[in-house]
Amino acid sequence: MLEVEAIDVAYGKRRALEGVSLSVGEGEVVTLLGANGAGKSTTLRAISGLVRPGRGRILCDGRDLTRAPADAIVALGIAHVPEGRELFPDFTVEENLLVGAHRRWQREAVREGLERAHRLFPILRERRRQRAATLSGGEQQMLAIARALMARPRMLLLDEPSLGLAPRLVTEIFRVIDEIHATGVGILLVEQNARLALGAATRGYVLETGRVVAEGPSAVLREDPRIRQAYLGLAGTPP
Ligand code: ATP
């Protein structure tokens, strides 16, 4: 469904990505691993149209989105949950969800979207009149994911969903990721916790200083001595 072909992205003179290529199939979960500053968030931003590649192409179902406006990319079915969540702190939970609804004038679709969000995250129903700023970190992450789902995407770009969360909430977020996957939505997952990310994804890519240095099925990446040492904190050679 999604093809990123050899993109370069720079912030001013600083090159963040160089020749990055990756693909995510319909309904597939793929992870993007890498140290801080490797270019993971930049890759997601390029796909969702928030930064523009200087070179290379991004295709969705064969259609070129490299220069498409961000709202057109959402309309094609790609929704981004940014690192840091970027909620509207003074809006209520429900108002934040409504911001995510791509076709707000379709009342039936909005109602269904809210019901889906509440089914996936019952806590958001309980808190629907509460300001987003007053939610816990885990609840804010749930709201950010639920808001992206309001656009009825076929693919979610998830940036560090477990960041700063207590272990119990991390487990909960990954349970939800599995549930979203089970509904046929594809996921490109950026995650510091490589063990969990490789558990949730069928394939992965490893970025180092803006380049893809390894890729393959999760089971193969898990056995790669460099990945075991650098990302999984294990001895180089598998037992
Ligand atoms: P992290 O896990 O720390 O978020 P990352 O892999 O997501 O890291 P990016 O945020 O994509 O990395 O950053 C890639 C490079 O681009 C880094 O060197 C970073 O300092 C730089 N960079 C990111 N955003 C900007 C910006 N808005 N302006 C200038 N440089 C930036």
Image (cartoon, helix red, strand yellow):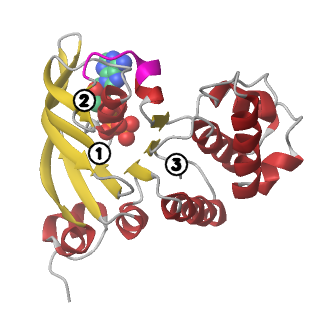
> Between marks 3 and 2, how big is the CA–CA gap?
28 Å
Crowding around mark 3 (Cα neighbors within 10 Å: few <14, some 14 to 19, many 20+) is many
Three-letter residue code for mark 2: Arg
Q: Which residues are magenta?
A: 66-72
Asked if the beta carbon under badge 1 is closer than 8 A to the nearest atom of ligand 1, the reply is: no
Sort mark 2 into few (<14), some (14-19) or many (20+) by Cα contacts within 10 Å: few
Q: Residue at x 79, y 24 (%)?
A: 91
Residue 32 shown left or right of residue 84 in the figure: left
The residue that appears at 69% across and 56% down in the rendered structure is 120
Q: Is residue 223 visible?
A: yes
103, 14: nearer the viewer: 103
Whole-Å distance between the Cαs marked 1 and 3?
22 Å
Q: Is residue 19 magenta?
A: no
User: Which image quadrant for residue 54?
Assistant: top left
Magenta span has 67?
yes
Q: Is residue 2 left or right of residue 119?
A: left
Of badges 3 and 2, nearer the viewer stands: 2
> Does ligand 1 reach within 8 Å of label 2's beta carbon?
no
Quadrant containing ligand 1 reads: top left
**Mark 2 or mark 1, earlier in chain:** 1
* Mark 1 or 3, nearer chain start: 1
Query: What amino acid type should be assigned to the residue bearing mark 3?
Result: Pro
Query: Which label belongs to residue 63?
Result: 2
The residue where tag 3 is placed is 161
Give the labeled residue for mark 1.
1
Residue found at x 70% / y 21%: 105
